[in-house]
Amino acid sequence: MRKYNTRPPLEERFWSKVKKTDNCWIWISCINQDGYGFFSFKGKATGAHRIAWILEYGNIPKGFSVLHKCDNPPCVRLEHLFLGTQLDNIADRHRKQRDGRLTRETHGGIKLKDAQVKEIKILFTEGWSAKELASKYQVHWGTIYKILKS
């Protein structure tokens, strides 16, 4: 008899989209404009860091957010996450003196510098595929498409 529900379990699908480094565990799938990963959960796009928390600890209490100790939006490493209110988030941001937005060149979690982004665009116009560029720069192919759309 053929098994119809052959989709991998939620945890397996989620963690297969994470690149574990010595420091942060980076979400390598869909990323929003602010650099946060997102994952389809119960039919809704949800922050990847929130899903990591839910998978480990259960539901997030009402009025709380999942915040980053590392200030790296695509990070989903549990040791880098903590619960807090919006006021906690604002106080944390102020304490770390990051009231302004980080740029590509100053954000510790960004792998590609501006010069590399420009080079990727040039190489693509010269016939390189997104897969080849992703391999060359050691990023996910989806990152290459996001660069090309920007």
Image (tube, rainbow, N blue to C red):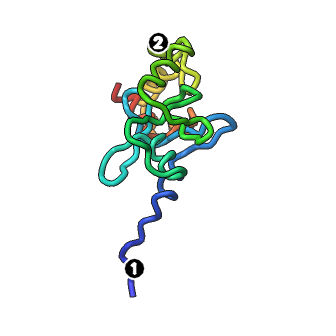
Q: Is residue 10 above or below residue 48?
A: below
- Mark 1 → mark 2, Cα distance in angstroms: 52 Å
Farthest residue to the left: give it: 43
Residue at left offset 53%, top offset 15%: 105
Q: Position of residue 47 (x, y in %)?
A: 41, 40
Residue at left offset 58%, top offset 43%: 19
Residue 7 visible, this angle:
yes
Kindly check if marks 1 and 2 are in contact, taking CB atoms under 8 A apart as contact: no
Q: Quadrant of residue 7?
A: bottom left
Q: Position of residue 126 (x, y in %)?
A: 43, 29
Would you say 3 lies left or right of 22 here?
left
The kind of secondary structure element at disc 1 is loop
- Near mark 2 (Cα within 10 A), the count class, few <14, some 14-19 or many ≥20, is few
The residue to which callout 1 is attached is: 3
Q: Nearer the viewer, mark 1 or mark 2?
A: 2
Quarter of the figure with the N terminus: bottom left
Q: Quadrant of residue 144?
A: top left
The residue to which callout 2 is attached is: 99
Quarter of the figure with the C terminus: top left
Question: What amino acid is at disc 1?
Answer: Lys
Q: Is residue 42 above or below residue 103?
A: below
The kind of secondary structure element at disc 2 is loop
Q: Position of residue 120 (x, y in %)?
A: 47, 26
Q: Quadrant of residue 87?
A: top left
103 or 10, which lies in front?
10
Residue at left offset 40%, top offset 79%: 3
127 or 135, which lies in front?
135
Question: What amino acid is at disc 2?
Answer: Asp
Farthest residue to the bottom: give it: 1
Would you say 105 lies left or right of 101 here?
right
